[in-house]
Image (cartoon, rainbow, N blue to C red):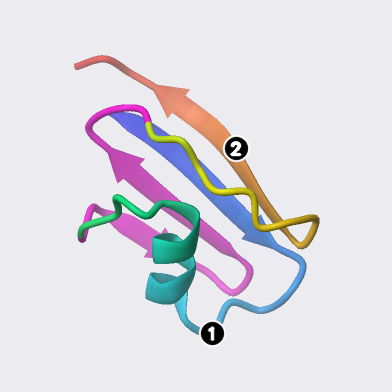
Amino acid sequence: MVKYRITSMLVISDGQALLQAVFPAYNGEQAWLEQSEITVTFASPQTPADLGPLVKVELISNDPQ
């Protein structure tokens, strides 16, 4: 499983919309939403979209199970 953390300088009000913007292939995969952070898990590596300096995406786990 491949896990990513999305952090934002702004409060995330619509996590689903942000996930779709960062990962266009997002299709209901497991995700956890906090006030300014989303953690999402995919079965395979994804290429995140660059949404500029207010949104940071980082790979936090790449466990090939």
Q: Which secondary structure, mark 1? A: loop
Left or right, 53 with reference to 36: right
Q: Position of residue 33 (x, y in %)?
A: 45, 67
State which tag comes first along the sequence, 1 or 2. Answer: 1
- Residue lying at 29% horizontally and 50% vertically, measured from the top left: 25
Distance (Cα) linking label 1 and label 2: 20 Å
Which of the labelled discs sits on residue 33, or is there none?
none
- Residue lying at 49% horizontally and 68% vertically, measured from the top left: 18
Identify which amino acid the numbered label 1 is placed on: Ser
Q: Are marks 1 and 2 in contact (CB under 8 Å)?
A: no
Q: Is residue 41 magenta?
A: yes
Q: Is residue 49 magenta?
A: no
Q: Residues within 10 Å of mark 2 (few under 14, many from 20)?
A: few
Residue 33 visible, this orientation: no
Query: Where, by quadrant of the figure, is residue 61 drawn?
Result: top left
Q: Residues within 10 Å of mark 1 (few under 14, many from 20)?
A: few
From the viewer's perspective, is residue 28 above or below residue 48? Answer: below
> Where does label 2 land, which residue?
58
Q: Which secondary structure, mark 2? A: strand
From the viewer's perspective, is residue 52 above or below residue 34? Answer: above
* Foreground residue among 45 and 3: 45
- Residue lying at 19% horizontally and 17% vertically, measured from the top left: 65
Identify which amino acid the numbered label 2 is placed on: Glu
> Where does label 1 land, which residue?
13
Q: Position of residue 1 (x, y in %)?
A: 27, 28
As drawn, the residue found furthest toward the bottom would be 13
- Residue lying at 27% horizontally and 28% vertically, measured from the top left: 44
Q: Position of residue 54 (x, y in %)?
A: 77, 62
- Start and end of the magenta stretch? 28-45
